[in-house]
């Protein structure tokens, strides 16, 4: 498979083939282009339909869009994987995620340990690159006594009671392990919804303050106006059917009859003739639809 690098989007470092943690190259075949873009960084802002990470490798902020529940939190360190390209305009750089990997620890030099990316690997040694308290990139050497499966770009935690003076410093009798992670993607989000499906029936669900929270319903219409949209039917409070229209701005694909969950956010509108929102829609397992054939739809 031939390697293709888009220098305009990924920068000179990627163009020259430099091994940068948090930024992977793109691959393309002669028949069908298949892209794999990976960006890491600290989450600095979370909104209803996107979040923003601070990428040290790209030296800029990247806006991340998802069509699943990413559960990103300000201050955490994440790795975003995408089958698409980084998109740039005069104001933002953005990426649509296929998965979001949440790291338990962020890179840095802490009181009792150091967290960094593996930059070089041998059978008995690792070179780990981390960011010091002044924001500078530093290296440390980690000797290994046992066989291992560490790879370049792994985020690792290094603990040592003694550091030998050298350039770079050597962690003597160090304990090194991969930083624990949790991945959110469409499949994990769907599994969560499947679990909810055993108790939640189609209808409108509200927050504690009485505002709409989400809808579980059936797609009854696929169409296109300024953008693709779907109509989702659900039972209202009075027992009659109601509809919410969902614009699909990120290329999502659904079929008539799909059972979905639509999460409402700041961009949702409940005050016009029609209820409208955009994105934040996920397909739910067909078991939920089967359940609705046996039990009457309910509203909560």
Image (tube, rainbow, N blue to C red):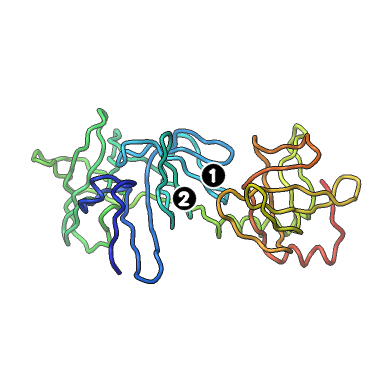
Residue 11 is labelled as none
Label 1: state its secondary structure. loop
Vertical placement of residue 76 versus 215, above or below: above
Using the image as rendered, state which of residue 269 and residue 168 is in the foreground.
269
Residue 71 is labelled as 1
Identify the residue at image location x=22%, y=44%: 129
Residue 182, image x and y in percent?
47, 51
Q: Within 10 angstroms of label 1, few (less than 14), some, or many (20 or more) residues?
A: few
Residue 36, image x and y in percent?
38, 58
Identify the residue at image location x=48%, y=35%: 74
Vertical placement of residue 267 versus 81, above or below: above
Residue 299, image x and y in percent?
83, 48
Left or right, 288 with respect to 96, comes to right
Residue 145, image x and y in percent?
18, 58
Q: Are marks 1 and 2 in contact (CB under 8 Å)?
A: yes
Q: Disc 1 to disc 2, how far (Cα)?
A: 9 Å
Using the image as rendered, state which of residue 2 and residue 265 is in the foreground.
2
**The furthest residue to the top:** 134
Identify the residue at image location x=19%, y=38%: 138
Q: Quadrant of the N terminus?
A: bottom left
Residue occupied by mark 2: 100
Q: Within 10 angstroms of label 2, few (less than 14), some, or many (20 or more) residues?
A: many
């Amino acid at each position: 498979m031939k390697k293709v690098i888009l220098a305009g989007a990924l920068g000179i470092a990627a163009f020259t083939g430099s091994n940068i943690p948090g930024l992977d190259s793109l691959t393309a075949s002669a028949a069908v282009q298949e892209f794999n873009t990976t960006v890491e960084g600290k989450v600095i802002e979370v909104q209803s339909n996107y979040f923003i990470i601070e990428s040290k490798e790209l030296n800029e902020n990247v806006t991340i869009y998802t069509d699943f529940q990413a559960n990103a939190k300000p201050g955490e360190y994440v790795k975003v994987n995408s089958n698409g390209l980084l998109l740039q305009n005069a104001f933002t750089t953005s990426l649509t995620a296929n998965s979001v990997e949440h790291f338990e620890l962020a890179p840095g030099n802490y009181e009792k340990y150091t967290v960094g990316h593996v930059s070089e690997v041998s059978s008995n040694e690792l070179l780990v690159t981390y960011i010091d308290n002044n924001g500078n990139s530093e290296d440390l050497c980690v000797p290994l006594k046992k066989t291992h499966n560490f790879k370049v770009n792994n985020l690792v935690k290094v603990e040592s009671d003694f550091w030998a003076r050298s350039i770079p410093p050597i962690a003597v009798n160090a304990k090194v392990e991969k930083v624990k992670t949790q991945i959110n993607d469409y499949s994990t989000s769907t599994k969560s919804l499947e679990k909810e499906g055993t108790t939640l029936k189609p209808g409108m669900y509200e927050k504690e303050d009485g505002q709409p929270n989400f809808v579980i319903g059936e797609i009854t219409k696929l169409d296109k106006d300024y953008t693709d949209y779907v109509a989702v039917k659900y039972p209202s409070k009075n027992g009659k059917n109601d509809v919410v229209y969902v614009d699909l701005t990120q290329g999502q694909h659904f079929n008539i009859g799909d059972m979905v969950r639509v999460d409402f956010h700041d961009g949702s509108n409940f005050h016009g003739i029609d209820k409208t929102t955009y994105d934040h829609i996920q397909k739910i397992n067909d078991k939920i639809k089967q359940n609705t054939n046996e039990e009457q739809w309910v509203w909560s």
